[in-house]
Image (tube, rainbow, N blue to C red):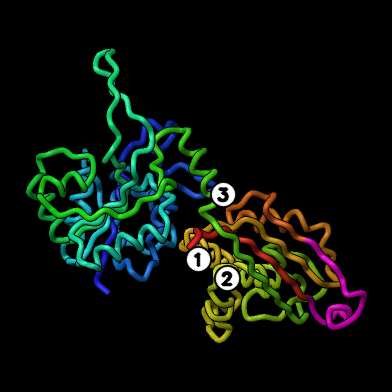
């Protein structure tokens, strides 16, 4: 497999989209547009280097938006998109990848299938691989009030990611630095590079206006996604102590819970459920109980890690349901605090979190008061493969 890098351009101001911040930092179903765009590439086995280009005054904001995603240090953009792309390419030059993709951060709905088609086309020998979508609408030109119909035969809309041999694209950017173009396909045309068409996708829209956010949200909820469900279970024995941790809430009790971390059975079960839904193993693989680093650790860290894995897969947590099984302590007085704490950790609306409790009618180890247990179900939405 060849070395492939991605330059994601996020230095624009995006004023037509409205809002208090540039469009790439505005939320789209709970996650910034920039994060959704980067998450589509970060962690892919066929992408070796992820280079983000952002404006100098947005580096700190970008750090927050991309927390946990693997990438290179930010590069500051230029006055135009073309200058920003070149800055990203120059930063990649010491790595000398074989191929480079260039993607607009304002296209957060790019699918794994489309990315794969571009990379596969380059691997098969193409110099430039460009996603194109045929123009379906009748086009009209306004010449000072005189309307003219433009034949749509042979017309296409260019999308990103656009893929190139790295050395060819960097040479073209250096040679035509004084020529302002709107995308890298236009630069490839100037440089005389052979362009191979890749099938684009209608859903790979570029967010430009406020209405585009609503359209993108509908698409994310629709056919681009598939739902995965994971289940988790955990149990802990009571031991000496004066409190227990359950679902991130400290509860006074006549005993504690025995465990390597804080023994929060609720969060442990939910972490396993999310890991299961994303196909990432179980909590013991990520946080081994033999590792002293996790002794006494807050289980919120485990849950945050599972949520990051969902982000990196380009997914979203849809709903979480936790059932606590015990005779004591009583869960009812703490249920809303537990829901709120889980919602805070996962950055979800409270309506997406359920916490409930039951007993085993004094049967079994929970009925005898020897310990307690928890089970959880998590539903996540992932990009369709």
Q: Residue at x 19, y 55 (%)?
A: 89
Separation of marks 1 and 3 at Cα, in angstroms? 19 Å
Quadrant for the N terminus in the image:
bottom left
**Callout 3 crowding tier (Cα within 10 Å): few <14, some 14–19, many ≥20:** few
Circle 2 residue: 275
Circle 3 residue: 221
Circle 1 residue: 309
In the shown orientation, is residue 34 left or right of residue 88?
right
Q: Residue at x 21, y 47 (%)?
A: 185
Q: Are marks 1 and 3 in contact (CB under 8 Å)?
A: no
In the shown orientation, is residue 4 left or right of residue 32?
left
Residue 12 position in % (x across, y down): 31, 40
**Disc 2 or 1, which lies upstream in sequence?**
2
In the shown orientation, is residue 67 left or right of residue 82?
right
Question: Considering depth in this image, is 298 or 18 the residue closer to the camera?
Answer: 18
Is residue 242 rendered magenta in the image? no
Frontmost of labels 3 and 2 is: 3
Residue 372 position in % (x across, y down): 79, 76
Q: Are marks 2 and 1 in contact (CB under 8 Å)?
A: yes
Q: Quadrant of residue 145?
A: top left
**Disc 1 or 3, which lies upstream in sequence?**
3
Q: Residue furthest bottom?
A: 290
Question: Considering depth in this image, is 258 or 97 the residue closer to the camera?
Answer: 97
- Residue 181 has which mark? none
Residues rendered magenta in the picture: 356-372
Q: Residue furthest top?
A: 145
**Callout 2 crowding tier (Cα within 10 Å): few <14, some 14–19, many ≥20:** many
**Disc 3 or 2, which lies upstream in sequence?**
3
Q: Are marks 3 and 2 in contact (CB under 8 Å)?
A: no
């Amino acid at each position: 497999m060849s070395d492939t890098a991605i330059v994601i351009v996020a230095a624009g101001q995006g004023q037509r989209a409205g809002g208090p911040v540039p469009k790439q930092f505005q939320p789209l179903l709970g996650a910034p547009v920039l994060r959704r765009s980067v998450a589509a590439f970060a962690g892919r086995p066929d992408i070796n280097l992820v280079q983000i280009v952002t404006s100098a005054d947005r580096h700190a904001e970008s750090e927050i938006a991309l927390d946990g995603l693997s990438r290179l240090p930010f590069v500051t953009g230029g006055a135009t998109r073309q200058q920003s792309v070149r800055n990203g390419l120059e930063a990649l030059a010491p790595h000398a990848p074989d191929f480079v993709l260039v993607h607009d951060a304002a296209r957060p709905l790019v699918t794994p299938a489309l990315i794969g088609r571009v990379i596969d086309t380059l691997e098969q020998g193409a110099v430039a691989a460009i996603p194109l979508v045929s123009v379906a609408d009748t086009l009209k030109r306004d010449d000072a009030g005189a309307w003219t119909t433009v034949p749509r035969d042979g017309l296409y809309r260019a999308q990103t990611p656009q893929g190139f041999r790295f050395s060819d694209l960097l040479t073209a950017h250096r040679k035509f630095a004084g020529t302002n173009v709107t995308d890298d396909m236009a630069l490839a045309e100037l440089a005389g590079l052979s362009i191979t068409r890749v099938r684009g996708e209608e859903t790979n829209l570029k967010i430009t206006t406020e209405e585009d956010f609503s359209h993108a949200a509908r698409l994310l909820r629709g056919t681009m996604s598939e739902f995965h469900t994971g289940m988790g279970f955990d149990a802990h024995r009571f031991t000496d102590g004066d409190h227990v941790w359950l679902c991130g809430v400290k509860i006074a009790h006549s005993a504690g819970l025995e465990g390597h971390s804080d023994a929060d059975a609720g969060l442990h079960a939910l972490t396993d459920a999310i890991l299961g839904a994303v196909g990432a193993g179980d909590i013991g693989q990520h946080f081994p109980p033999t590792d002293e680093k996790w002794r006494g650790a807050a289980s919120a860290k485990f849950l945050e890690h599972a949520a990051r894995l969902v982000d990196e897969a380009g997914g979203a947590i849809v709903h979480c349901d936790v059932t606590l099984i015990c005779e004591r302590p009583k869960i009812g007085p703490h249920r809303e605090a537990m829901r709120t704490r889980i919602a805070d950790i996962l950055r979800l609306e409270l309506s997406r979190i359920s916490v409930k409790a039951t007993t085993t009618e004094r049967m079994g180890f929970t009925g005898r008061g020897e310990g307690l247990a928890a089970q959880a179900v998590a539903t996540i939405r992932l990009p369709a493969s």
